[in-house]
Image (cartoon, rainbow, N blue to C red):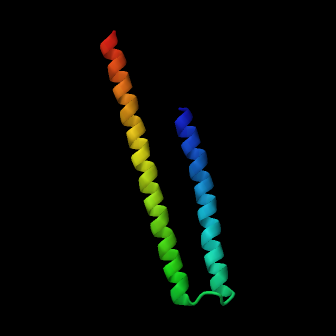
Amino acid sequence: MKILLVLFAFGSFVACSSSNELMRIQADYEAGILTLEQRDQAIAAFREKERAEREARRAEREEQQSEEARRRAANIRLF
């Protein structure tokens, strides 16, 4: 249960920082710092980075769940 709460809080933080990063990219475009092409590339790169991070978190969660299942199975065999 604790891990789910931590993941929820972390997910909320990530969503907030994601929004901030996208707003910064858009602001740079509107200020003339980025061209439209550069903005689109920055957004695409940012989304790819987010996707990779989500995948890594998912894999870590699956590994933790697998480890917990192994421990439960080992405890059941002891009884």
Q: Position of residue 50 (x, y in %)?
A: 49, 63
Q: In the displayed structure, would residue 74 be above or below residue 11? A: above
Query: Up-down: is 27 above or below 74?
Result: below
Locate residue 77 relative to residue 36 in the image: left or right.
Answer: left
Using the image, determine if residue 19 lies above or below residue 10. below
Residue visible at 67% across and 80% down in the picture:
27
Give percent across and percent down for residue 11: 56, 51
Residue in the image at 66% along x and 90% along y? 32
The C terminus - image quarter: top left
- Which residue is situated farthest in the top direction here? 79
Q: Is residue 48 left or right of residue 16?
A: left
Number of numbered labels in the structure image = 0
31 shown above or below 59: below
The residue at the point 32 percent across, 22 percent down is 73
In the picture provided, is 57 more to the left or to the right than 32? left
Where, by quadrant of the figure, is residue 62 drawn? Answer: top left
Which residue shows up at 60% across the image and 87% down it? 34
Q: Which one is in front, 48 or 30?
A: 48
Front-most of 12 and 33? Answer: 33
Name of the residue lying farthest toward the right: 31
- Residue 37 lies, in percent from the top left, at 51, 88
Foreground pick, 75 / 30: 75
**Percent position of residue 17, x then y:** 63, 61
Q: Is residue 57 shown left or right of residue 22?
A: left
